[in-house]
Amino acid sequence: MRLSEAQLKQYDADGFLIVHDLFKAEELKGLQDEIDGLVDDLARRLQGAGKITNLHADKSFYYRLTALERDFPGAAVLIHIGGILKPQLAALWSSPKLLEMIEQILGPEIMGHPVWNLRSKAPSHVLSTVPWHQDTAYLAAGAEHTFQPTAWIPLIDADSENGTIQVLKGGHKSGKVFQHQLENKKASKASWYLYIEDADLPPGEIVTCNMPLGSVLLLNQLVPHRSTENRSDRIRWSVDLRWQRPGEPHGLEGVKDPILMRTAKDPSYTIDWEAWAKTSRNAIEIGRADKAMEMKDEFNAMVSGPWMDRWR
């Protein structure tokens, strides 16, 4: 799909753009089935290790992980930090519908950034409510000068009840990285998130992005945004995917490199996912690297990364 000139101007001016009806529900069904498989695998591993007794196999896509989280706190985080890119998500990330829009924004040379996320916002789950931040704050200093558009794609009708995204309209215009704090310094919340104090936020309109299934939210890496609490009874599944131009700083140097997705130099180019997809940046970031599946406690829900040192 190609964006109109008006849409491109809006994205540039506001720092975000909602694109409605980009995907049909059936186009996302394969990804939902893939996620179901990840949840089932986690449930069976937890049961095999004696962590839970009930697989909750009778529960559906929007409910099963909530039940597992209730039985084993941390299950939702384990899904989030799994880090192994599966085929259906890879296919969505590199889909022509997305890459056509990204080519209009970045040009014909497109890299997929190492940061991608599968997010499971379980109901009333404290670590699923993400405070005000800029995406670039989670990367090494200097990466903010690299244009890194992000697509946030909900796998449910996302609204204020189940915790959709809120964006600070035009908050990217200064080109600055605002002061961020480590949320885990708050005694009341063990967290890996960064947050911007209200006093450090630029002025601007807060926009709540209500998005039907099939919609995509495009974000500038500098625009402050947050996701609110899920007050519904269903999981708000979503993915976020990021791109940039080749040869520019990506902010995860020494951890994992971007992957080439599209190039005008070779119209017949196809992405070599195999080795790249199997390497978990999350495992590397917390010192597990090739031993990700051999660690003594594979159910450790620890999250860490270079942003911890940057903002300590």
Image (spheres, helix red, strand yellow):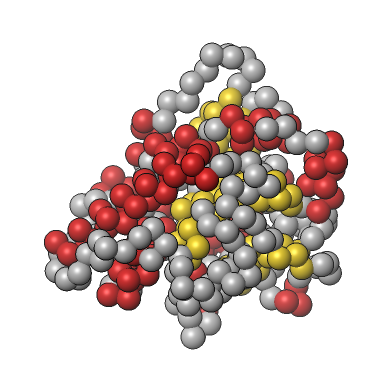
Q: Is residue 286 above or below residue 109?
A: below
User: Is residue 51 visible to us here?
Assistant: no
Residue 124, compared with residue 140, is above or below; it is below
- The vertical placement of 107 against 88, above or below, is above
The N terminus, quarter of image: top right
Residue farthest to the bottom, as pictured: 188
Residue under the point 64% across and 17% down: 264
**The quadrant where residue 311 appears:** bottom right
User: At which x and y percent is residue 27?
Assistant: 50, 39
Q: Residue at x 76, y 77 (%)?
A: 199
| Left or right side of 221 for 23 | left
Could you say which is closer to the camera, residue 179 or residue 38?
A: 38
Query: Along the horizontal axis of the image, is 110 left or right of 204?
Result: left
In the image, 38 versus 184, the foreground residue is 38
What count of labels does the image hold?
0
What is the x, y in percent for residue 108? 68, 25
Check the image and report above or below for 310 versus 19: below
Q: Residue at x 72, y 32 (%)?
A: 2
Looking at this view, is 200 or 308 the one in front? 200
Q: Is residue 4 left or right of residue 276?
A: right
The image quarter in which residue 170 lies: bottom right
User: Which residue is at a point 36% across and 30% down the rendered structure image?
Assistant: 274
Quarter of the picture holding the C terminus: bottom right
Image spot of residue 29 (x, y percent) = 44, 44
Residue 238 placement (x, y as % from top left): 51, 55
Residue 292 visible in the current orientation? yes
